[in-house]
């Protein structure tokens, strides 16, 4: 191979990463991907969808790597043979957002479950992503813990990503559960404000998965492993820690 071909091949090295709308909407990838690409000459092309869709893309063999936030689902993904390894990368938390007038009074709730129960009792508008994302899965677990089966005119399942769901909630003066990173980066809050935070059940862990070579031998496993290892390295963890919006750190590295 000539030197020219070698340079061209190196320039075209890339992986497809299936990940979440929260990592994309928050601006995290804009901050950390150039650092990874500078270190490795590997481009990362992100497909940002809900976690459920990201699992499906990876299950079909249409992505080389997976970075999502549904630990139980990720562990099942490994157990079912679609991935060979899963590792903690970083965390943040979910928050409950709503109109400043707070018609359901959730700012005074003692737990996230109580806050959701108050919203249901008041039949106050609630905008749900309804897209099988990690955020949506966490929200549904919270309704279950609150003993509520949400439905009726007050509960709107949108089937959209975090940013569009926040836009709809702002237009409706509705309550919504969001990951903190997307909320902090959101530029159109209108009357919305953060009303409830801090319950340990709102902890939001992100994991990176190495996909199965046996199941999908055609994938770029060597390049994907470099991405996975970089995320877990001191350099990758520092890049995540350094990412801020308006002076606020949005993701907290916790690779073991």
Image (tube, grey):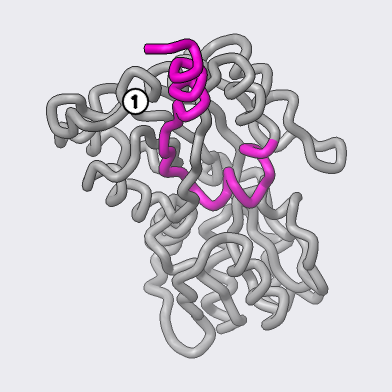
Residue 201 in the image: x percent, y percent? 51, 44
Closer to the camera, 71 or 210? 210
Pointer 1 residue: 86
Residue at the spot 49% in from the left edge and 50% down from the top edge: 48
Closer to the camera, 114 or 236? 236
In the figure, 226 relative to 13: above or below? Answer: above
Residue at the spot 53% in from the left edge and 40% down from the top edge: 204
Q: Quadrant of residue 191?
A: bottom right
Position of residue 54 in the picture relative to residue 252 (left or right): left
Q: Is residue 31 located in the magenta-colored stretch of the structure?
A: no
Residue 224 in the image: x percent, y percent? 38, 24
Q: Is residue 9 located in the magenta-colored stretch of the structure?
A: yes
In the figure, 162 relative to 44: above or below? Answer: below
Residue 193 in the image: x percent, y percent? 78, 63
Helix, strand or loop for disc 1: strand
Position of residue 11 in the picture relative to residue 181 (left or right): left
Q: Quadrant of residue 137?
A: bottom left
Visible residue check, residue 72: no
Q: Which residues are magenta?
A: 1-30
Residue at the spot 14% in from the left edge and 32% down from the top edge: 215
Position of residue 211 in the picture relative to residue 191 (left or right): left
Residue at the spot 30% in from the left edge and 23% down from the top edge: 221
């Amino acid at each position: 191979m000539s030197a020219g071909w070698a340079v061209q091949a190196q320039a075209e090295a890339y992986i497809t990463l299936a990940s979440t709308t929260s990592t994309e909407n928050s601006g995290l990838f804009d901050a950390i991907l150039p650092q990874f690409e500078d270190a490795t000459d590997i481009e990362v092309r992100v497909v940002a969808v809900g976690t459920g869709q990201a699992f499906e893309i990876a299950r079909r063999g249409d992505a080389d790597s997976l970075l999502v936030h549904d630990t139980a689902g990720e562990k099942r993904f490994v157990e079912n043979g679609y991935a060979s390894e899963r590792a903690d990368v970083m965390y943040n938390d979910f928050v409950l957002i709503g109109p400043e007038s707070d018609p359901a009074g959730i700012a005074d709730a003692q737990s996230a479950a109580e806050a959701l129960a108050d919203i249901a009792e008041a039949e106050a508008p609630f905008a749900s992503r309804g897209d099988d994302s990690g955020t949506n899965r966490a929200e549904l677990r919270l309704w279950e813990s609150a003993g509520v089966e949400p439905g009726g005119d007050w509960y709107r399942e949108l089937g959209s990503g975090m940013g569009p769901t926040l836009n709809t909630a702002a237009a409706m003066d509705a309550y919504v559960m969001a990951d903190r990173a997307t909320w902090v980066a959101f530029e159109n809050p209108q009357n919305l404000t953060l009303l409830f935070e801090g319950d340990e059940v709102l902890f939001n862990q992100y994991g990176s998965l190495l996909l199965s070579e046996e199941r999908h031998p055609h994938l770029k496993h060597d390049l994907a492993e470099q991405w996975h290892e970089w995320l877990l390295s001191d350099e990758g963890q520092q890049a995540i820690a350094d990412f801020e919006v308006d002076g606020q750190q949005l993701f907290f590295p916790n690779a073991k």
